[in-house]
């Protein structure tokens, strides 16, 4: 069996590594193509361009790894089946699942790697990408306030649902939430307001409610107010420097934000959908291996290109499932769990069914 494992792995590793290199090159090249006019007009230095491309490598790897497993599994099984090597192994009494086991192990290992990168590497790289792009387009090194992101300053945690900059000199904010970290021995405070205005370091909150929270997280008392002013000591541009989009947070950070702001009755559906996708997308490496191997075995008799064709079909259908899951999840038609995991459930069950049929 060890000889069989090494043989199957040797068949898969080459197309897998080639696919990783090709897709990373393709995705990073796409970034360069989309920004080439801006780079040329701004006369950006070579070092800055290389930094931008290097920062996109973790994102590109996250996109490439599932596709590389898909192509590696499809092409290797297709080749083994066309040369009747899988047939010979089965005639020797080796089950189909046992033949596919090295491919599934590779898919599982790559899924763990993709999840680790999505938690530890990609969020930091995405934030650096944003800062680098702002430098390229000539903006300030600190970002302006964005909608539906979280940021913190001076013991406060902030969330703003919508930003209106139509009025000169003043920024209008809608669906504002502030959480104040308490000193030792005191209760935390959560302030919500339907709208607010900000002018430099002064925030004026309108039509809001102050919630005093107990040690158990439950509200001790609430107090409505028509208007409240919050004078921050540092300039707003410095305050906004800590804001993060969901792409710049790992699953743990996003889960904390959901727990923090969900308790106030605010809508957290979009955050929940994003959180489930952060967990489900890395698993696609294993799901692709589970689904592509039996499909490629079944269609191998149609020629050497059938493995490539099946990879494209699986990739297309999987992507369509993700898009529909996002649409239904964000609209509330399905629970966030179903929206984020439906593609893995469907294709995983399909792969198990196909292996069972081959057996």
Image: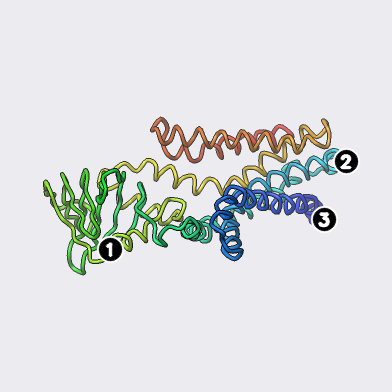
Q: Residue 83: which disc? A: 2
Q: Looking at the image, which is closer to me, 259 or 169? A: 169
The Cα–Cα distance between marks 1 and 2, rounded to whole angstroms, is: 69 Å
Q: Residue at x 80, y 50 (%)?
A: 11
Please tell me whether residue 254 is drawn above or below residue 297 in the rendered image.
below
In the rendered image, residue 110, in percent from the top left (x then y), is placed at: 63, 54
**Foreground disc of the pair 1, 3:** 1
In the rendered image, residue 250, in percent from the top left (x then y), is placed at: 46, 56
The Cα–Cα distance between marks 1 and 3, rounded to whole angstroms, is: 66 Å
Q: Quadrant of residue 82?
A: top right
**Secondary-structure class at tag 2:** loop
**Foreground disc of the pair 3, 2:** 2
Q: Disc 3 marks which residue?
A: 3
Q: Disc 1 marks which residue?
A: 235
Sequence-first tag of 1 and 3: 3
Q: Is residue 10 left or right of residue 136?
A: right
Sequence-first tag of 3 and 2: 3
């Amino acid at each position: 069996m060890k000889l069989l494992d090494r043989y199957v792995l040797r068949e898969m590793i080459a197309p897998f590594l080639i696919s990783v290199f090709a897709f990373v090159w393709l995705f990073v090249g796409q970034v360069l193509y989309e920004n080439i006019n801006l780079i040329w007009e701004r006369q950006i230095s070579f070092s800055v361009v290389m930094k931008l491309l290097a920062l996109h490598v973790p994102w590109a790897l996250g996109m490439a790894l599932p596709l590389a497993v898909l192509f590696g599994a499809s092409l290797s099984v297709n080749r083994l089946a066309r040369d009747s090597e899988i047939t010979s192994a089965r005639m020797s009494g080796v089950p189909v699942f046992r033949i596919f086991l090295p491919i599934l192990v590779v898919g599982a290992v790559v899924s763990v790697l993709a999840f680790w990168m999505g938690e530890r590497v990609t969020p930091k790289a995405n934030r650096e990408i944003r800062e680098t792009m702002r430098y390229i387009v000539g903006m300030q090194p600190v970002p302006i306030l964005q909608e539906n992101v979280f940021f913190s300053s001076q013991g406060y945690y902030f969330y703003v649902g919508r930003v209106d900059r139509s009025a000169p000199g003043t920024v209008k904010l809608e669906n504002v939430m502030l959480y104040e970290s308490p000193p030792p021995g005191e209760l935390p405070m959560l302030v919500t307001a339907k709208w607010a205005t900000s002018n430099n370091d002064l925030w004026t909150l309108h039509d809001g409610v102050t919630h005093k929270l107990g040690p158990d997280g439950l509200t001790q008392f609430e107090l409505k107010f028509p208007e409240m002013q919050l004078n921050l000591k540092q300039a707003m541009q410095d305050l906004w420097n800590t804001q993060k989009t969901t792409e710049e947070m790992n699953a743990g950070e996003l889960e904390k934000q959901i727990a923090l702001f969900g308790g106030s009755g605010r809508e957290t559906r979009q955050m929940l959908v994003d959180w489930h996708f952060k967990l489900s997308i890395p698993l696609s490496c294993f799901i692709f291996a589970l689904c592509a191997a039996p499909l490629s075995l079944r269609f191998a008799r149609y020629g050497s290109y059938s493995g490539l064709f099946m990879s494209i079909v699986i990739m297309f259908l999987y992507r369509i499932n993700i898009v529909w899951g996002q649409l239904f999840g964000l609209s509330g038609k399905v629970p966030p769990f179903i929206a984020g995991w439906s593609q893995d459930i469907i294709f995983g069950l399909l792969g198990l069914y196909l292996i069972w049929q081959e057996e």
